[in-house]
Image (spheres, helix red, strand yellow):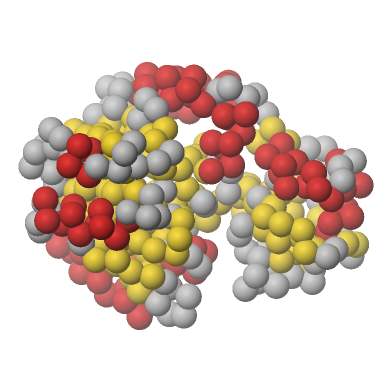
């Protein structure tokens, strides 16, 4: 299989699509002002070709902060695209669509990946999708777009998740997750006074969550939202740690980008050696696939800001180009199988 990347900083979809012939799946990443028109125009250019899209920034060797990006798979791919609706209420109502699509492409663990773009309620969506995917051991990689909208096959949906099932007909696929953070000290917190619907942490070990964070890191209230780049929370999930970013301060509480429940065990994380971690990710992928056909990744917006502030973003894309054709999306939350994480990178590599 092969991966196509095209972009137009001016938002000219035909310019971004120049050279794209016989695609078997197209992913659209557009700006908020042109998203609707780009969705319609893409369907007109490639009628009947499976497609998913969202509002967001794409990248290859550069980041397209404005305009439009197309990433497409072709030459040896079987794909289908669809949507689960009412994700804030009952996404399971539409799960039969995913089950039928899995059957349609004869999805198998070794050669199929699910890529999703979500408009919200990510944790519930991933639990729902995993219920169908796990029967065939299909991995999932994806993320959250901006604006509460996604697209699938030429139509725009709110309160939905768009997904594509991609089967590599000439090789294997494998999903990966990268964590650039490590535990800070031996901090362990029991969360309480949480609001699951609003992602609020009211208290840690019975004390104000805001005050606990400030006291440990010696930061002002105004510094908390930038300090989370260096020190997010981590939620223990078996032997794994899911990163939780702080979104805002609300009184004595902290509002996060993902759900925390009463009695969840949290840790405090600190930034590790970023370049070393990225090199290790590249090594792992090349160990599995010495010559990958393509790598599609989702990088968190906070990673993008952190890398940009440190002058590393361009070097990061250059490092990742060692994998060959690497392209992706800057998301507002990252998906890895049934996990909804923050400040992470998830990706799928194709043999």
Residue at 27%, 75% in the rendered image: 96
Question: Where does residue 233 sit, x and y in percent of width and height?
Answer: 71, 49
Q: Quadrant of residue 172?
A: top left
Query: Looking at the picture, how far across and down is residue 260, in whole percent?
Result: 67, 63
Which residue does the image show at 42% across and 32% down from the upper left? 63
Residue 174 in sight in this render: no
Is 71 rendered above or below residue 245?
above
Q: Residue at x 28, y 36 (%)?
A: 7
Is 159 left or right of 156, judged from the image as shown?
A: right
For residue 333, side relative to residue 74 (left or right): right
Q: Residue at x 30, y 43 (%)?
A: 11
Q: Is residue 160 visible?
A: yes
Residue 287: quadrant of the picture: top left
Q: Nearer the viewer, residue 137 or 14?
A: 14
Q: How many marks?
A: 0
Q: Is residue 116 left or right of residue 336?
A: left
Name the residue nearer the viewer: 193 or 318: 318
Residue 174 is drawn in which quadrant? top left
The answer to whether 238 is drawn above or below residue 154 in the figure is above
Q: Quadrant of the N terminus?
A: top left
Q: Position of residue 350 (x, y in %)?
A: 27, 35
Residue 109: x %, y % from top left? 29, 49
Compare residues 67 and 319 and report the one nearer the observer.
67
Image quarter hosting the C terminus:
top left
């Amino acid at each position: 299989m092969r991966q196509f990347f095209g972009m137009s900083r001016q938002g000219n979809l035909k310019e971004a699509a120049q050279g794209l012939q016989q695609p078997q799946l197209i992913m659209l990443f557009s700006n908020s002002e042109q998203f609707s028109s780009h969705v319609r125009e893409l369907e007109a250019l490639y009628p009947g070709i499976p497609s998913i899209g969202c509002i967001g920034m794409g990248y290859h060797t550069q980041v397209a902060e404005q305009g439009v990006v197309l990433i497409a798979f072709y030459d040896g791919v079987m794909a289908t695209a669809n949507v689960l609706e009412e994700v804030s209420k009952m996404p399971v109502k539409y799960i039969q669509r995913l089950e039928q699509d899995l059957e349609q492409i004869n999805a198998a663990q070794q050669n199929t990946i699910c890529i999703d773009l979500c408009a919200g309620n990510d944790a519930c969506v991933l639990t729902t999708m995993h219920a169908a995917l796990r029967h065939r051991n299909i991995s999932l990689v994806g993320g959250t777009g901006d604006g509460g909208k996604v697209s699938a096959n030429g139509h725009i949906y709110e309160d939905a998740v768009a997904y594509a099932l991609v089967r590599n007909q000439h090789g294997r696929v494998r999903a990966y997750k990268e964590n650039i953070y490590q535990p800070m000290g031996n901090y362990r917190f029991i969360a309480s006074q949480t609001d699951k619907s609003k992602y609020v942490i009211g208290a840690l070990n019975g004390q104000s969550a805001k005050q606990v964070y400030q006291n440990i890191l010696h930061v002002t209230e105004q510094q908390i939202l930038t300090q989370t780049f260096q020190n997010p929370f981590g939620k223990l999930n078996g032997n794994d740690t899911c990163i939780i970013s702080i979104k805002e301060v609300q009184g004595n509480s902290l509002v996060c980008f993902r759900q925390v429940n009463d009695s969840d065990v949290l840790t405090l994380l600190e930034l590790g050696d970023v370049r070393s971690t990225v090199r290790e990710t590249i090594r792992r992928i090349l160990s599995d696939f010495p010559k990958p056909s393509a790598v599609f990744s989702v990088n968190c917006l906070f990673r993008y800001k952190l890398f940009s502030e440190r002058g590393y973003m361009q070097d990061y894309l250059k490092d990742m180009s060692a994998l060959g054709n690497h392209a992706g999306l800057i998301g507002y939350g990252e998906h890895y199988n049934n996990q909804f994480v923050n400040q992470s990178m998830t990706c799928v590599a194709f043999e």
